Image (cartoon, rainbow, N blue to C red):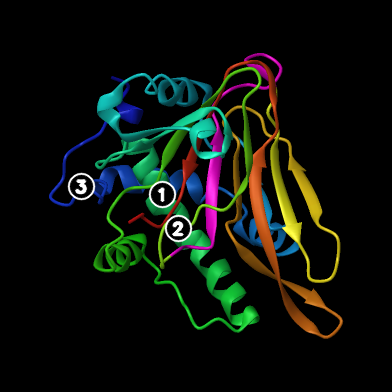
Amino acid sequence: MNAAVSSKAAADPATPPPSVVKAAEERVDSYDWTALASDLDDYGCAVLGKLLTPEECRALAALYPHEEHFRSHIHMARHGFGRGEYRYFRYPLPDLIAGLRTALYPRLAPVANRWNERMGTDARYPERHADFLKACHDAGQLRPTPLLLQYVPGDFNCLHQDLYGDLAFPLQVAILLSEPGRDFTGGEFVLTEQRPRMQSRAEVVPLRQGDAVAFAVHNRPVQGTKGNYRVNLRHGVSRVRSGMRHTVGIIFHDAR
């Protein structure tokens, strides 16, 4: 098993080892978070280029057939979600995913808190992901939500929002594990924004292997002529035309 994707037992299976967190923090801290926060404010999404190496991408994608890493297996067509399939990881998460989940959260929490303030929402998010997870678990949201998705020709993911309980962190991250043009064609990441009394806006986010996109899960504020107003967002994946596409989704709240 590749060390980057190994799972290690801990006293709390939702808490990654300190060494794993430190390595992820060093990786995440290398980005210009002022610029990324500005992109999130302006467009509802921001790209972290080359967050994972090609070797790490291949190692994570290779986990898909191995059921011992996952708590459930979803076929989208059975639920009207589109076509394709995905698996939710079980705790303890693979080290690479657990570390990134812990390291990315404190970079995104200030954006989430600023958005809630602008939208007049009372909820505020703690600095540490462990504290937010504790709140989720205390509320009965105990099931891990990071997932690994697999698409083949003809598959697509309908526009949706990943909300799994009363507590939901308003941003999430998706990492493309496959290389467009080599491993698959089609399969673009799509974000739509429904604005009050206006037509919806679509954002197609070009990604390469190892790139991550951070994006709004549900709502975000937009500055208008009369102050801030709330827009509603959904995300999905367009039809894969050839090959196979794998993606990791990092959702920061847990599910009921």
Question: What amino acid does circle 3 point to?
Answer: Pro
Secondary element under disc 1, as helix, strand or loop, is helix
Determine if the magenta segment contains residue 83: no
The quarter of the image holding the N terminus is: top left
What label sits on residue 13 in the rendered view?
3
Who comes first in sequence, dot 3 or dot 2? 3
Amino acid under label 1?
Arg
- Determine which residue is flagged by label 2: 105
Classify 10 Å Cα crowding around label 3: few (below 14), some (14-19), many (20 and above). some
Please give the name of the residue rendered at 31% of the width and 67% of the height, measured from the top-left corner.
Answer: 131
**Disc 2 from disc 1: Cα separation:** 6 Å
Which residues fall within the magenta stretch? 168-185
Pick whichever, 82 or 208, lies toward us.
82
Which quadrant is home to the C terminus?
bottom left
Residue under label 1, please give it: 101
Name the residue at 34% across, 29% down: 5
Answer whether labels 2 and 1 touch (C-beta < 8 Å): yes
What amino acid type should be assigned to the residue bearing mark 2?
Answer: Tyr
Viewer can see residue 48:
no
Where is residue 198 drawn, in percent x and y? 86, 66
State how far apart marks 3 and 2 are (Cα). Answer: 18 Å
Q: Is residue 108 left or right of residue 254?
A: right
Crowdedness near tag 2: few (<14), some (14–19) or many (≥20) residues, C-alpha within 10 Å: many
